[in-house]
């Protein structure tokens, strides 16, 4: 039986494996090869890795982990997790994978979230480049261009506030929805243009200066060319393990954890954007936040193993 099985080969899982490896814990890291940031060609707002392709970041992490003899990286997907003894979950866990079953004394879930994108045609094809969800991760790349904000929900005003210093102008694509009067007042105060018509599709275009962009084709027969489009995906758990283990969830649908990544089931920890504490209204969807959560959870796991 291993000390720890980490499910998920993104930033949270990789950092947790490093932290545990440095205390010589017997760790297996399961990496399915599927990542939330697969659509993007570069990661941003990560000190030392700004503009680096996600695969390059993972390659560097794998080389780092290779120096630690107690950490094993297995490129295989997990399908099911369960306590070895349902009456005593802290007694260990079994993880069923493509390559067979594994057992460990403790379990760290770092499987992340899945972005369920708006159904507007063209969004999926542009997501991760011209279309993005996080101003901190991708907003700077739209500097000096008109930026669209797709949707009519409460998020529109906040995104407009974050992007107004970056964009040459703001265009809210309300997509046939009704804006709350307070949201509309905030947009008017920022000088944002509002297009009320339904968005029929987004098409890739090249703007002056060879800047990649998108053309939003509207149902009223008009179109607007944009250097970037901010969208608001619905977040879903990327894996079924929280449900399989019966973990408590927050209203966001993410796993409820404390500051050290402990879940409601003894012996099970969670890190990264699949989980968050009560202090945060939403998961922090960034590489650096995931790494920090992975390090904290690993420290908590190490201490928990010392207790028996």
Image: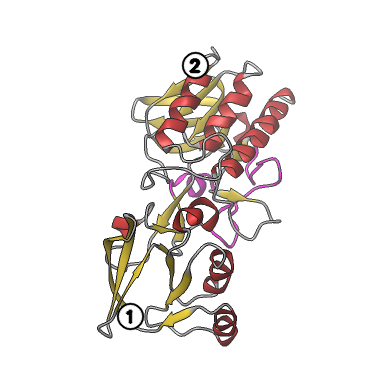
Residue 150, magenta (yes or no): no
Find disc 1 in the rendering and name its residue. 198
Q: Quadrant of residue 297?
A: top right
Q: Give x and y (percent) for residue 202.
A: 29, 67
Disc 1 is placed on an element classified as loop
Mark found first going from the N terminus, 2 or 1: 2
Residue 303 can be seen in this image: yes
Q: Along the horizontal axis of the image, is 86 left or right of 240?
A: right
In this view, the mark in front (2 or 1)? 1
Q: Give x and y (percent) for residue 285.
A: 54, 50
Indicate whether 237 appears above or below 70.
Answer: below
Closer to us: 95 or 70: 70
**Badge 2: residue crowd in 10 Å (few <14, some 14–19, many ≥20):** some
Q: Residue at x 37, y 29 (%)?
A: 76
Residue 250, magenta (yes or no): yes
Q: Quadrant of residue 19?
A: top right
Q: Along the horizontal axis of the image, is 98 left or right of 291?
A: left
Q: Residue at x 53, y 62 (%)?
A: 166
Find disc 2 in the rendering and name its residue. 66
Quadrant placement of the C terminus: top right
Q: Give x and y (percent) for residue 87.
A: 60, 38
**Badge 1: residue crowd in 10 Å (few <14, some 14–19, many ≥20):** some
Main SS of the magenta segment?
Answer: loop
In magenta, the rendered stretch is: 238-266
Q: Give x and y (percent) for residue 193.
A: 46, 80
Residue 105 can be seen in this image: no
Indicate which disc residue 111 carries.
none
């Amino acid at each position: 039986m291993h000390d720890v099985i980490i499910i998920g080969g993104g930033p949270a899982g990789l950092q947790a494996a490093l932290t545990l490896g440095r205390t010589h814990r017997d760790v297996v890291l399961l990496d399915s090869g599927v990542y939330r940031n697969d659509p993007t060609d570069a990661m941003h707002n990560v000190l030392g890795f700004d503009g680096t392709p996600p695969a390059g970041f993972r390659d560097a992490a794998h080389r780092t982990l290779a120096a630690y003899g107690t950490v094993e990286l297995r490129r295989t997907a997990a399908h099911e997790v369960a306590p070895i003894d349902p009456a005593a979950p802290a007694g260990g866990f079994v993880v069923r994978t493509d390559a067979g079953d594994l057992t460990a004394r403790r379990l760290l879930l770092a499987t992340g979230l899945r972005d369920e994108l708006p159904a507007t045609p063209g969004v999926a094809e542009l997501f991760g480049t011209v279309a993005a969800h996080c101003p901190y991760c991708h907003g700077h790349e739209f500097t000096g261009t008109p930026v669209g904000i797709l949707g009519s929900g409460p998020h529109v005003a906040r995104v407009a506030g974050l992007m107004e210093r970056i964009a040459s102008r703001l265009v809210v694509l309300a997509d046939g929805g009704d804006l709350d009067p307070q949201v509309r007042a905030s947009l008017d105060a920022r000088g944002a243009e509002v297009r009320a018509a339904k968005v029929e599709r987004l098409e890739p275009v090249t703007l002056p200066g060879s800047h990649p962009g998108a053309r939003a084709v509207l149902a009223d027969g008009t179109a607007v060319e944009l250097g970037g489009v901010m969208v608001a995906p619905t977040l879903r758990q990327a894996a079924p393990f929280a449900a399989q283990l019966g973990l408590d969830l927050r209203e966001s649908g993410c796993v409820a954890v404390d500051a050290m990544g402990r879940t409601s089931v003894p012996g099970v920890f969670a890190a990264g954007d699949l989980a968050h504490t009560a202090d945060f209204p939403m998961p922090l969807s960034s590489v650096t936040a995931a790494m920090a959560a992975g390090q904290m959870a690993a420290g908590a796991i190490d201490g928990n193993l010392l207790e028996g």
